[in-house]
Amino acid sequence: MRRIAALLSLLVCVSVPVHGQDGDLYFSVSPAEHSVVEGLPVRLRCEAQPSSHVRYSWKIDGQPLAPSPRRHQVEGDLYITRVNRILDSGNFVCVATHEETGYSIESSPAKIDVQCKTCYSDISAYLRRIV
């Protein structure tokens, strides 16, 4: 009887999923598309579950995001303090990697559409005149 109880408890332990295994990692918050006037800040949000032992990185147009004093990361979120039309226009992807298993997932691309600052000012001035 003890042997059967021991086998049943082993069977129960084996069938319980362990967080952090391949496939358990998923995005609870994915980056969204933004339209931003050049020079203004933007934040791209990213959070994966389970949240413990997850390391985040970012890509732009398929390439690892180059370090920059204008860009910094807090947990999974990417902050760009002054959006630049040339450097920041593109598709951003958040990469979440479980540190214990090495399993990685990538978010859907989130496009940042950087609007020309002077063009925006010209349009605003024009709209004020005609209204």
Image (cartoon, rainbow, N blue to C red):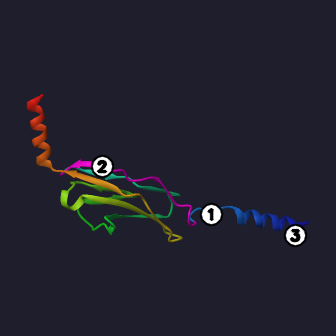
Q: Identify whether 101 is placed above or below 121.
A: below
Task: Say which quadrant the N terminus sits in.
Answer: bottom right
Marks 1 and 2, how far apart at CA = 36 Å
Considering only order in the chain, which callout, 2 or 3, is on the residue closer to the N terminus? Answer: 3
Q: Residue at x 33, y 50 (%)?
A: 33
Is residue 21 shown left or right of residue 131?
right
The label number, if any, that marks residue 34 in the structure image: 2
Please say if the residues under marks 3 and 1 sit with CB atoms less than 8 Å apart.
Answer: no
Residue most extreme to the left: 129
64 relative position to 17: left or right: left
Tell me where the magenta segment starts and ends, as one range: 21-38
Q: Residues within 10 Å of mark 3 (few under 14, many from 20)?
A: few
The residues tagged by marks 3 and 1 sit, at their Cα atoms, a distance apart of: 25 Å
The residue under the point 24% across, 64% down is 68
Is tag 3's residue or tag 1's residue first in the polypeptide sequence?
3
Task: Tell me the amino acid under the disc marked 2.
Answer: His
Image coordinates of residue 128 in percent, x first then y, are 11, 32
Farthest right residue in view: 1
Q: Few, some or many C-alpha atoms within 10 Å of disc 2 (few <14, some 14-19, many ≥20)?
A: some
Q: Residue at x 24, y 59 (%)?
A: 88
Residue 3 — which label? 3
Query: Mark 1 — residue?
Result: 18
* Mark nearer the viewer, 3 or 2: 2
Q: Secondary structure beneath disc 3?
A: helix
Please name whichever residue, 46 or 52, is drawn nearer the observer in this view of the structure. 46
Depicted 118 relative to depicted 57: above or below: above
Q: Is residue 58 left or right of residue 80?
A: right
Magenta span includes 125: no
